[in-house]
Image (cartoon, rainbow, N blue to C red):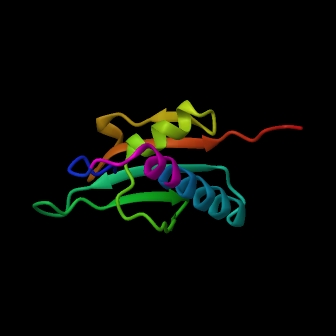
Amino acid sequence: MIDYKRNYTDSELTERINLLWLELEKQCTELNSYEFEYYWEMWGVMWMPWFIMIDQNSLNFSANDISSDDLEILVKQGKLEIIKIYETHEMQDEFERIRYRIIKKHN
């Protein structure tokens, strides 16, 4: 999640998104899957952990505050596509559940 209390410079935001992309692509390749789901849960006041999952595997990232805004930047850059936005009735305790696919460039 972009920390709206902090003003990122353009270069910091670019570096942050590039690092997210590199880590995401690497982990997807290691798990041999180019689709993943992003969502967050509310576990208490001001405690809202986010998850990026492939099947039942939770991916780990250097940034501890990734949000759908960050992934939307990668969609706009043409690196990801949204496959499914889950409806409220399809979710249990999670919020903003979205399924993404990495767009592979063909040479």
Depth order, front residue of 90/10: 10
- Left or right: where 67 falls relative to 71: left
- Residue 62: x %, y % from top left: 47, 68
- Residue 79: x %, y % from top left: 63, 39
Q: Main secondary structure of the magenta part?
A: helix
Placement of the C terminus among the 4 image quadrants: top right
Seen at 53% across and 56% down, the residue is 20
Instruction: State the count of labels.
Output: 0
- Residue 63: x %, y % from top left: 42, 63
> Could you say which quadrant of the image residue 22 lies in?
bottom right
Work out which residue is located at the far left of the displayed protein and give it.
45
Position of 56 relative to 95 (above/below):
below
- Residue 54: x %, y % from top left: 56, 58
Depth order, front residue of 15/86: 15
Q: Is residue 13 magenta?
A: yes
> Could you say which quadrant of the image residue 89 lies in?
top left
First to last magenta residue range? 7-15
Depth order, front residue of 40/89: 40
Seen at 59% across and 34% down, the residue is 77
Depth order, front residue of 64/90: 64
Seen at 51% across and 65% down, the residue is 59
- Left or right: where 29 falls relative to 48: right
Seen at 20% across and 50% down, the residue is 5
